[in-house]
Amino acid sequence: MLAERVKKIKPSPTLAIDSKAKAMKASGVDVISFGVGEPDFDTPEHIKDAAIRAMKEGFTKYTAVGGIDPLKDAIIEKLQKDNGLSYKRDEILVSCGAKHSLYNIAQALYGPGDEVIIPSPYWVSYPDQVLLNDATPVFVRTYEADSFVLKPEALEAAVTPRTKALILNSPSNPTGMLYDRKALEKIAALAVKHNFYVVTDEIYEKLVYDGACHISIASLGEEIKALSLVVNGLSKSHAMTGWRIGYTAGPAAIIKAMTNIQSQSTSNPNSIAQKAAVAALTGPQDFVAMMHGEFDKRRKYLVEQLNTIEGMTCRMPAGAFYAFPNTSKIYGRRFGDRVIAGSNDLALYLLEEAKVALVHGAAFGDDDYVRLSYATSLEDIIRGVQRIREALGNLKAGK
Ligand code: PMP
Ligand code: GLU
């Protein structure tokens, strides 16, 4: 018999769609994938070389549970340089991807009776990680008309004596929303006033466009820093999704608890990947700028095109690599006997009829939308948009 907690969760929908698209491709179907959020660029050579060197030098054994000192130091330097944040080694934990960092936080902080506030639309793993730790996710809806920014009034209305933490994600997956300093200051003031933690997932920080600037809420003062757990990783910034390196910076006592959890679950993150991560953080950063430039071109093209498809409207995202068009006007239309009743039906229809994979908005807590990752080649984006346009053109008005 399975434990009760397992019955509350589902597989990651983004990973499930990616597996389905990959299986279709493997069986010879020409699927265009806007599904998973994974840079299509290869990991830069100098990073791979560092990993090869590590293996050749026999750096293939257990390391310190929380990560090797040179990697912690590279992370400390990065946080200082990019985010204006000062941390010591005992305030850093390296884990097996940012998802694992978030999970360690969940295990260390959340328990029965605790409430964790999650602005919606949200990234798919936040609610399930809360549920896996017997706590309650409390969703606070954000709206397209407000650029999906969490309103302080809405946040405060959701706070109770049981509120343990707020999970913030800026730039956001899936909306592409980016908080400015003013909005963060208001949220920080509420966290300090009501004494809850802020889990700040900054994995897309390098992907902000139009001259905008990413700000870490933890950098807004000592009081909010003491309540912040800054989560970041190498997956998106350095095209290293498979290497599984993420990290948390936060108060030493929490980092210690998380390190103990890690020592009893995964032990250290992969030793070779840690050496590669040192090279990624301390080596040349021109790759990051190149990738950013490419994503920016695709972002503009994709969003412009989506807005020319009848039934869809799409905001220009300020960050990350996702377009999040509103598709609610399409709901109710028909294809033969089939009714497109919501985002799930739409995603399935597009996968089956147009051979285009994207993620239904319901997976992120908002059925009015679908998510397209533009971390895929411009060529595929051009072909994919054409297929979507044609498939939607084949739908008939509902009765
Ligand atoms: N946070 C967000 C918002 C994400 O989109 C992802 C996607 N991979 C992660 C965390 C986890 O990244 P990883 O575990 O690959 O570091
Ligand atoms: N974060 C990516 C996404 O949202 C990767 C998938 C996952 O980790 O769930 O597509």
Image (spheres, helix red, strand yellow):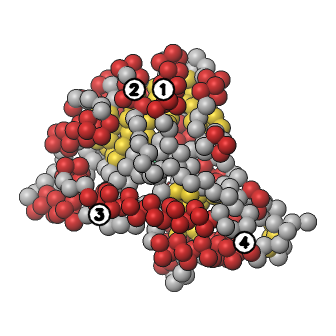
Disc 2 residue type?
A: Leu
Disc 1 residue type?
A: Glu
Which residue position holds label 3? 43
Q: Is label 1 within 8 A of ligand 1 (CB to nearest ligand atom)?
A: no
Q: Residue at x 52, y 62 (%)?
A: 300
* Classed neighbour count for the residue bearing mark 2: other residues with Cα under 10 Å, few (<14), some (14–19), many (≥20): some
Classify mark 4: helix, strand or loop: helix
Task: Indicate which disc, 1 or 3, sits on the residue closer to the N terminus.
Answer: 3
Which residue position holds label 4? 392
Which residue position holds label 1? 185
Question: Which residue lies most toward the right here?
Answer: 399
Which residue position holds label 2? 220
| Position of residue 381 measured from the top left corner of the image (x, y, whole percent) | 52, 71
Disc 3 residue type?
A: Thr
Distance (Cα) linking label 1 and label 3: 36 Å
Distance (Cα) linking label 4 and label 1: 42 Å
Classify mark 2: helix, strand or loop: helix
Q: Residue at x 26, y 29 (%)?
A: 86
Question: Which residue lies most toward the left here?
Answer: 57
Q: Residue at x 43, y 61 (%)?
A: 295
Classify mark 1: helix, strand or loop: helix
Distance (Cα) linking label 4 and label 2: 46 Å
3 vs 2, front mark? 2
Distance (Cα) linking label 2 and label 1: 7 Å
354 vs 308, nearest the viewer: 308
Q: Are marks 2 and 1 in contact (CB under 8 Å)?
A: yes
| Position of residue 29 measured from the top left corner of the image (x, y, whole percent) | 55, 81
